[in-house]
Image (cartoon, rainbow, N blue to C red):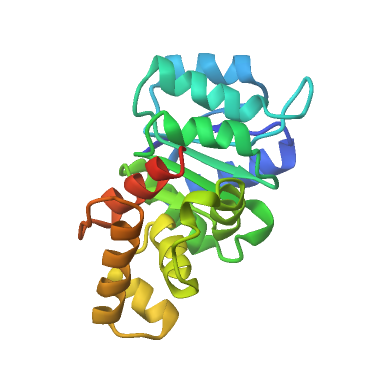
Amino acid sequence: MRVVILEDNPILAEGLGLLLNNSGFEVVAVAGDADEFAKAVAEHDPDITVVDVRLPPTFTDEGLRAAIEARRVRPGLPVLVFSQYVEEVYAAELLAAGSEGVGYLLKDRVSRVDEFLEAVRRVAAGGTVLDPEVVSQLMVKRSNPLERLTPREHEVLALMAEGLGNAAIAEKLVISEGAVHKHVGNVFLKLDLPPTDSGHRRVLAVLAHLGL
């Protein structure tokens, strides 16, 4: 599985490269800015990209904008954003462009290497991986449509948005899978969205409703 990394910190870039190469991936390029990234994607046609948010020259949102442009040029290009920051505007735009093969993880909140590697694999396979804190910040920004949900339904919705299925949600919340199924149905009913048993389609529906 071929990977292009966009990370301007040479120590972090080297560490990510070693981790991925030693875990069955092939890091074909490491870019330090948006221009290098665009050239690397065009040259190597990667299976997934791992992208930081704040890069030269302004250290604001260059990485996300580079990812959005890369997916515009090559629709469906898997992108895993790996950053210390939640950049809400461009994160929403990245997801709005099609949330298949998109992830957003916060560096300070990834506590296990296997979690990160699983996220890379899931995004490369077309899945969606969102850190709960990212979900929380995006949902707070667009909270009005969600006011009809109960506290438990909010919990279920947040876990759905992370890409979890009913069994995993039941385990997280320590409730039965039948109860989760009922909550899921209520969430979609209250948000005027058709229910579905597909975890990935549920993520897409939730993100679409939130305007992402």
State the residue lying farthest toward the front. 148
Q: Nearest the camera: 189 or 196?
A: 189
In front of the other: 91 or 45: 91
Q: For the point 56% across and 65% down, which residue is it?
A: 112
> Residue 139, image x and y in percent?
55, 51
User: Is residue 144 rendered to the left or right of residue 12?
Assistant: left
Q: Position of residue 146 (x, y in %)?
A: 47, 56
Residue 158 screen position, x and y as percent: 47, 61
Could you tell me if residue 115 is visible in this image? yes
In this orientation, which residue lies closer to the viewer: 172 or 136? 136
Any part of residue 4 in sight: no
Q: Residue at x 43, y 77 (%)?
A: 172
Quadrant (top left/top right/bottom left/bottom right) for the N terminus: top left
In the rendering, at what x and y percent does residue 2 appear?
A: 40, 34
Residue at the spot x=61%, y=14% of the render? 35
The residue drawn where x is 45% and y is 74% is 152
